[in-house]
Image: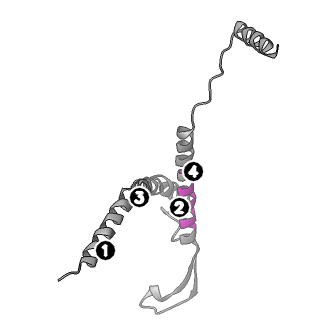
Amino acid sequence: MRHSWFNTGVKNLLREFKEFIATGNMVEIAVAFILGAAVKQVIDSVIANIANPIIGAIFGETNLDGLLRITLRKGDKADPADDTVLAIGAVLTQLTSLVLVGAVLFVVVKAYNKFRQPPPPTPIQISEVDVLVEIRELLKARG
């Protein structure tokens, strides 16, 4: 048998959770997460379908993982995975990916900021007659 304080506590907890979910921040975070996943797919496509073929045309491989490998110590002859290797090419591949992700995000944020900016205010057209009337009214007010 549950106590009334337990029911009250659960009801309060559920109410607070509902208020938390209904706040604008939670919805904004969810939208940002979904858009982030979509942007990641676009960036992955740019890397796989544009950057890697260019790297392949230059270096003969679709990425730099196999290039610049320095074996420091040979491992078991039966299993080359036991070798101790400096894989500089793999690091260069990841650096290339980082630069491309940064470039795409830069373009997206720049476009977003440009879209978000309000249009510049239009200059107010005041005729000479309006200016003269205003000067006359100011002079009258001064006495």
Residue located 57% across and 35% down the image: 118
The image shows residue 69 at horizontal and vertical percentages of: 56, 76
* First to last magenta residue range: 92-104
Q: Earlier in the sequence, mark 2 or mark 3?
A: 3
Are the residues tagged 2 and 1 within 8 Å (C-beta)? Answer: no
- Which amino acid lies under the numbered mark 1 shown in the image of this protein? Gly
Along the polypeptide, which appears first: circle 4 or circle 2?
2
Pointer 4 local density, CA inside 10 Å: few below 14, some 14–19, many at least 20 = few
Picture disc at residue 106: 4
Q: Within the magenta stretch, is there residue 98?
A: yes
Q: Verify CB contact (< 8 Å) between mark 4 and mark 3.
A: no
Q: Distance between the residues labelled 4 and 3?
A: 25 Å
Mark 3 vs mark 1: in front: 1
| Residue of label 3 | 26
Q: In this view, does 76 lie above or below 10?
A: below
- Callout 4: SS: helix
Q: Which residue is drawn at 57% across and 45% down?
A: 110
Please tell me which of labels 4 and 1 falls first in the chain: 1
Amino acid at the residue labelled 4: Phe
Question: Mark 3 to mark 1: distance in Å?
Answer: 23 Å
Q: Nearer the viewer, mark 4 or mark 1?
A: 1
- Judge the density around disc 1: few (<14), some (14-19), many (≥20) Cα neighbours within 10 Å: few
Residue placed under numbered mark 1 in the picture: 9
Kindly indicate whether the residue at mark 1 contacts the one at mark 4 (C-beta within 8 angstroms). no
Q: Distance between the residues labelled 2 and 1?
A: 49 Å
- Looking at marks 4 and 3 on the same chain, the residue that comes earlier in the sequence is marked by 3
Find numbered disc 2 in the image and state the secondary structure of the residue it sits on. Answer: helix
